[in-house]
Image (cartoon, helix red, strand yellow):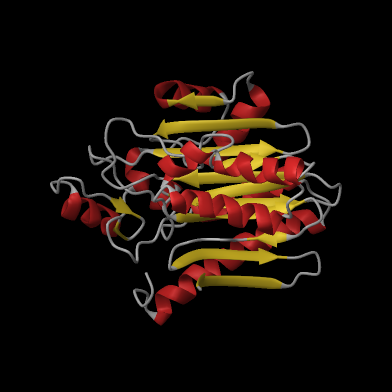
Amino acid sequence: MAGALTPEQEKAYLDKLSEALQTGYTILTNGGSSIDAVEASVRILEDSPLFNAGKGSVFNCEGKNEMDASIMNGKNLKAGAIAAVHTIRNPVSCARAVMEKSSHVLLAGDGAEKFARESGIEIVPPSYFYDEERYQHWIATKDLEGASWAGDTYITNPEKKLGTVGAVALDSAGNLAAATSTGGINNKKFGRVGDSPIIGAGTYADNKTCAVSCTGEGEYFIRQSTAYDISALMEYKGFSVSQAATEAIKKVAQLGGEGGLIAIDNQGTISVPFNTSSMFRGWIDSKGEKFTGIFR
């Protein structure tokens, strides 16, 4: 969506990215875990209406906000995820509860909502997620055959923005973690679930290799098992994280999909390939040096 943001809007996005980075960095520099860092960073983005996750989630075909999220611990390969939920303020925290308080990996719909209530996860009325701009986007597309919305523009628009949020981190103990959260695609039908809550597709972490969080047209990432593919290329072929991540996005593109990802290896090397005109992204290293960006 090059050129689609005003200077004020661009600053707002970059400021929120910076806040999320600083939140995770503060946890890590105080000896906190990578799991704590990615959850806290994603919660910052879920609480902002700027991003298509949590408060800023787009509307499905019934005019409801429907969210997915996942989290994975590279230390023990434990993971948790939820899909198709409507009243959980911070889906990433519920995903973590699934990982830590249940024997399951993925809970969906009413079952996930019930689990959240029983686990003490904050529940809010559906009206909490209402955003006038998102609603007007849905109104403009809901009767158009084959049209849907990803973030802020039609998915048929080559300048589209895909709005999933995510975080990856490496802590001082050498443990990796990844988390992803999304409101999905505007006007999505039939209980559609994308890659964000699918471990190995949109999220993956393994201390032996890397941590990955993906964003884009989820169906393509599911078909390629993109997040796990990066780890496998590193483990079995000896690829660097940059080589593996670039190859994984290339495979998505070969299927006709668009998107990107953030990845970090067990040495702290970062890779953020994407095949779209822009991707909201940022990182902060062990020295506190920070980068945030949107366009290429």
Please name whichever residue, 57 or 150, is drawn nearer the observer in this view of the structure: 150
Q: Position of residue 281 (x, y in %)?
A: 56, 64
Q: Is residue 53 left or right of residue 226?
A: left
- Residue 43 visible, this orientation: no
Please name whichever residue, 58 or 263, is drawn nearer the observer in this view of the structure: 263
**Direction top: furthest residue:** 103
Examine the rendered structure and indicate whether residue 1 appears above or below residue 59: below
Q: Is residue 69 left or right of residue 19?
A: left
Q: Position of residue 218 (x, y in %)?
A: 43, 43
Q: How many marks?
A: 0
Examine the rendered structure and indicate whether residue 192 appears above or below residue 138: above
At x 17%, y 55%, the residue is: 140
Quadrant where the N terminus sits is bottom left
Examine the rendered structure and indicate whether residue 213 appears above or below residue 23: above
Q: Position of residue 56 (x, y in %)?
A: 39, 53
At x 14%, y 49%, the residue is: 144
Please name whichever residue, 123 or 190, is drawn nearer the observer in this view of the structure: 190
Q: Position of residue 93 (x, y in %)?
A: 58, 38
Q: Is residue 136 left or right of residue 177?
A: left
- Residue 152 visible, this orientation: yes
Please name whichever residue, 261 or 26, is drawn nearer the observer in this view of the structure: 261
**Direction left: furthest residue:** 143
At x 29%, y 40%, the residue is: 188
Examine the rendered structure and indicate whether residue 14 appears above or below residue 152: below
**Direction bottom: furthest residue:** 7
